[in-house]
Image (spheres, rainbow, N blue to C red):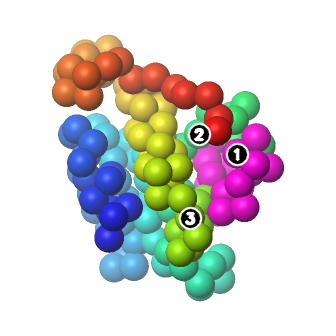
């Protein structure tokens, strides 16, 4: 699936399935930046939980039908994105990259520097779309 491939393409990403075979957790230095899973109680489609800037969360939810408050997560810092056929793949890829960048920005400098070099730029945040 393209969402899994997008997450795995980010430098230093590791994946595991601590919640069972229907979920993948993507981490950078053991810090989660994405949870890709299937939960029929939430959606008929795959969903991905992503970390977002607290001030961007309500804006993203208001502006995009596929974005909701983070399911089973801290709703101040996390969003849930429904990967329906109507989802704009470019937009979701940006959200994944933003989530990765948000987590990288919170890492100690000694861990952050090599990742910035691999990505070509320091970890940063974009404004909401």
Locate the N terminus by quadrant.
bottom left
Work out whether mark 3 precedes mark 1 in sequence or the reverse, and give the earlier one.
1
What residue would you read off at disc 3?
87
Residue 92 bears which disc, if any?
Answer: none
Callout in the foreground (1, 2): 1
7 up-or-down from 42: above or below: above
Q: CA distance from mark 2 to mark 3?
A: 18 Å
For the record, the magenta segment spans: 59-79
Residue beneath disc 2: 52
The residue at the point 46 percent across, 23 percent down is 124
Using the image as rendered, state which of residue 72 and residue 41 is in the foreground. 41
Of residues 10 and 107, the one nearer the viewer is: 10
Query: In screen coordinates, is 90 left or right of 52?
Result: left
Residue 78, horizontal then vertical, whole percent:
61, 47
Query: Considering the image in quadrants, where does the C terminus appear?
Result: top right
Q: Where on the picture, by quarter, is residue 88? A: bottom right
List the residue tagged with mark 1: 60
| Residue drawn at point x = 53 percent, y = 49 percent | 91
Q: Secondary structure at mark 1?
A: helix
Image side of residue 88 versus residue 5, left or right: right
- Any magenta on residue 77? yes
Depicted 55 relative to depicted 7: above or below: above
Residue 65 lies left or right of residue 123; in this view the side is: right
Question: Count the marks: how many?
Answer: 3
Question: Mark 3 or 1, which is nearer the eye?
Answer: 3
Q: Label 3, secondary structure: give it.
A: loop
Answer with mark 2 or mark 3, whichever residue precedes in sequence: 2
| Residue at image point 33% right, 47% down | 27
């Amino acid at each position: 699936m393209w969402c899994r491939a997008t997450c795995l393409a980010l430098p230093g990403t590791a994946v595991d399935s601590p919640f069972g075979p229907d979920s993948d957790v993507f981490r950078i230095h053991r810090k989660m930046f994405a949870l890709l899973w299937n939960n029929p109680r939430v959606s008929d489609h795959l969903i991905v939980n992503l970390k977002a800037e607290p001030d961007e969360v309500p804006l993203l939810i208001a502006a995009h039908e596929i974005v909701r408050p983070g399911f089973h997560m801290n709703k101040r810092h996390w969003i849930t994105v429904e990967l329906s056929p109507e989802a704009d793949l470019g937009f979701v890829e940006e959200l994944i990259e933003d989530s990765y960048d948000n987590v990288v920005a919170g890492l100690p400098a000694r861990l952050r520097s090599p990742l910035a070099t691999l990505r070509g730029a320091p970890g940063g945040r974009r404004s909401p779309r």
